Each structure stands twice: as structure tokens, then as C-alpha cells.
Amino acid sequence: MDNAIETIDLTRRFNGLVAVDKLNISVERGEVFGLLGPNGAGKTTTISMLCAILKPTSGTARVNGFDIVKQDMQVRKSIGIVFQDPSIDDRLTGRENLYMHANLYGVPPGEQKSRIDSVLKLVELEDRADDLMRTYSGGMRRRLEIARGLIHSPKILFLDEPTIGLDPQTREHIWSHIEGLRKAHDVTMVLTTHYMDEADRLSDRIAIMDYGKIVASDTSAALKETLEGDVITVKTKEASKLSSVIAGTPGILKANVVGDGLELTVRGGKNLLPRIVEAATKNGIFIEAVSLREPNLGDVFLHYTGRAIRAEGGEELHGMAAIQRRRIK
Amino acid sequence: MTEIRGIYTLWLREIKRYLRDRARIVSSFVQPLLWLAIFGTALGTLIKIPMPGLTYQEYIFPGIVGQTLLFTSVFIGISVIWDREFGFLKEIMVAPISRFSVFTGKLLGASTDAIIQGILVFVLGALLGITFNPLVLGEALPIMILITFGLVSIGLIVASFMESLESFGLIVNFINMPMFFLSGALFLIRGPGVPSWLQIVAICNPFTYAVDALRTVILGSSWQPLYPLYVELLVVVCFDLALIAIGTWAFGRRK
């Protein structure tokens, strides 16, 4: 069988600015594909094009075998989407939102009730289904949106930053729902996120996106393996000085000055750690803190882009603001 | 079939939202009340309508029915901006139904709200002691529906081009006020002493024809229509078709 998604030099420009740059990715049927990258990397633009909301400037893609430019109606029928920002009508109840969705997607009236009941059960919102959406918490809204995306049994489900702006407990809750989905439904999922842990936990394969391009793409484990080393983080005000002092020490594979310190990719971290501290002391560099750990996806990102994944603070606020705005109305 | 169910569900949404918004229903009484009770009575002592047996209040009553339809219809466009602001518009735009159906669903829902407001003005008129045959509502209703389609379309079109609520409010006032004042809703636009430029502008205003048609059916034989009723209805229908076409295009723009 053909792939769920296949992009061919997919490109989108906004007033000369390239948001997505000749993207070529393929997503296999039944897998969870994670698109990981910082804010502004082009993830949402990519998803918008794949959902036929936004027209590509050049190139195209096939989603469930349909061309996103020429067969946009068939594409829309094949997909479900959970948008990054809230997209529910908060003057209606949860159930009313779901019925509306079912009607918009042409779910036969005879099947609507049973499908709605089953998705409500999946996200554990049966007892709140008849309350107005405006009384829901952020996490509940998100769960209802996930439920909504499934009513018409889409072949492909897009989740754009599904846990943005949510507290850790709610995130955990939503992750387990997403994992539950895979077992209950035969659905391909495309997930975008700027949270490393989220991509790591949910995805079968991950593509790291930066400035509209894919910089690396593989399974989470394989991506980490490419680093073949431990990560030492040294917190100091004189990171660049330390970097030049220890340059050339055997075992240090890579050194990056980040924020308030130095991040080193090394082989044999345990033995190297005392040597680095020693070198620093000898040269009068004050070290505030030091840590050693196995590589995570954040390091992979750093490895491929030379930059730490940008702080999520800004977007988190944005997500919260979006939710807040709905309440103010 | 999918398209019709899509239109139905979008229509139903507008109705539910409207019926749940008590403040909107109550406030819809206020403006026509001010016009009819205060403006109609106070100014009525100064203005003589050259039609025998017709008070000024009775004269403006059909105009105020029209005014309510005009203001409510055009302002409902703001819901499109709310939907965009709160993200709901994306849910509709990504759905597998045609842009024509999206526009039509919104149009029918908003028109229903406006028509309900218009009917409430009749209730208000009766409470204020304005004499009219209750049966004329049956004749006025088709005219009200016809003009409302066009007026709601104006609001939806403006909203589809506006980025913010504030700019929507500004633009809409530039449309509403001239359409209202230059329609003959409050004063005669033909007769001795009416400047010719005003007559010309009023004739170019499609809303004039709706107001006059309403006046023709509500006031009956005591009113001398500007044009035959069928001509006025034809103008309104053309106005509707043009705006629905523009509206479908405006909603269908994909960036």
C-alpha cells in the first residue's frame, strides 16, 4: 500500500520569507510521525498545507493518495485535525460541538450517536458532555478536540502541538489518550511539537525541522545513537574561555556555548568530568554547577542545528493567551 | 446531501447561540423603542406627513422595521470575526463542504436571527398602539426575508476582509448610517422641497426599495408607493444575488 503522506518539494513562502523549503517527507500508514522543531520552524505551515487550508507556493503533497492542490475535498474527508489554538464553539455544549462536526463531515445520522458516545468515552468526558464548553478547563477542551477529530474515522489524524499550555499532569493524561487511540483506531498520526519529551514518548519516527527544512529524520533511538556520546553541561559565566582551555582534550567530540554555560558531547563522560573541572580551576574559571547525562532529543536538535531548541516560554504564553481570550469574550 | 446537512448544522449553531444570548434579545427591543416612542412622538409633532390620516409614528414604523433588519443583519457579520479570533472558523474551513455551503449556512442562520428581531418590532409597534392590520405581517415577512439576505451578506463580506473587531465596527457604520438615512425610512425622499441630489442618491440605495415595499404592504391604501411593488422586489432580488455571489467568493479565498 502507498504511504499515508508523501510530500514533493513542498514549499511555502510568505512575502519572500521561506516558511517551508522544498520539504520531502513520507509518512507510512499506521505510524506516529513526529515533527519536532522550535517555534517558527514551519511545522504549522506544513500541517496547514497538508490539510488543504493553505496553498503551497510550489511543490505538492499526496495525503491518503489525494493531491492537496487538485483534490482538496478528498483530502479534507480523509483527515482529522486538532489545531494548535482552540477551535471549539464555547457557547455550545461538548456534545453539540461533536454533532456539528459529525454533520459537517457527513457522518450518517444513524451512526452519529454511537460514534459520539464512543469518542466521548475514549477521552473520558461522558459526564461533562452536556455542559457548555466555556465551563471546561484547558485540558478538557483539548480532549474534546481530540475526540472531535476522530468522529468521522479519519485515515490520518494531525495533532498540532497537542499539549501546549497545559500543566504536566494534564499533558501526561493527554499522552495516554493519544497512546490509547493507536490501539483503538487504525489511524496514522502526524504530531508536531517543540517538546522533546513529547516527540520522544509518542512518535515512531521523528523528523527534526528547522528554518523550513528537515535536518534529520529517523527513529528516536537511532537519532540519539548518532550522538554516540554523553552530554556534560557546565554552568559558568566564562563558557567561551573554558571552551578554548579544554579544546583538544581527548574524548571531547563537540563543544557548544549555550545560554549560561557550555554543553559538551563527550565519549566516556565519567572519566572526563574531573579533568574538565581540574582544567577550569587551574585557569581560574569559576564553575557554578556541572551535570552528566545520556543524550536526549534536545541534544540531537543541538547536534544538527548548532542551537538549543528555543525556550518554549513565548509560545506557551501564546497558547495560554488563546485560551484566556476565549474566556474573556 | 452532505452539503445540505452542513448548511443545516451551521444554521442550527447560529440559532442556538442567538437564543442563549438573552442580552442580545432584550437589547434588540431598545433601539426600535427609542426610535418609535421618542423620535416618532417628539418629531411627529413637528413633521406633517402629506398623506391624510397618517401620523408620523405610523409613517416611520415600516422604516423602523427595515432599520432593525439593516442594523442587526449587517452587525451579525461580526460573528465571523469572533469565529476567526476564537479559532472556530478553522474548524469550518477545514471541513469537507463547499465554500458556498459555508456561506449559505452562515447567511441563513444570521438571517433567521435578524428576522426574529424584525418580527419583535411588530410586537413592539402593537404595544405602542400603532395601528396596523396584524395580517400584514404575512405580506411583510417575504419582503423582510428578501432584504435580509442581502444585508446579512454585506456584513459577512465586510467581516471576511476585516482583521479586527474595531475596524469592522467602523466600516459597518459607514455603510449602515447612509443606507438608513438615505432610504426614506424617516422622511420622504420624493415630493416638493426634497433636493434633487437626495432623490438621486436615495434611488441608488437598494435599501430604499425594501423600505418602500414594506411601507406599501403595511400602510396599504394610505401610502403611495415610489414604484410598483414588483419593480421594488426585483431590485431587492438583484441586490441579493449580487451580494451572495460576492460573499461566496469572499469566503472561498484560500490563502
Image (tube, coloured by chain):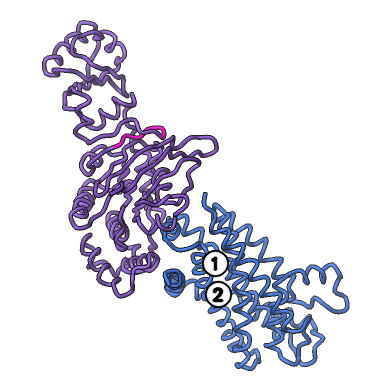
Residue ranking furthest to the left = A271
* C-alpha gap between disc 2 and disc 1: 8 Å
Q: Are the residues tagged 2 and 1 within 8 Å (C-beta)? A: yes
Residue B22, visible in the rendered structure: no
Q: Give the residue displayed 20% in from the left and 50% down from the top.
A: A179
Instruction: Chain letter for blue, please.
Output: B
Residue drawn at x 27%, y 57% is A143
Q: Which residue is mark 2?
A: B114
Q: Secondary structure at mark 2?
A: helix
**Which is nearer the eye, B96 or A246?**
B96
Residue range highlighted in magenta: A207-212
**Residue most extreme to the top:** A282
Label the magenta part by its dominant secondary structure: strand
- For residue B187, above or below residue A26: below
Name the amino acid, label 1: Ile
**Chain A: what color?**
purple
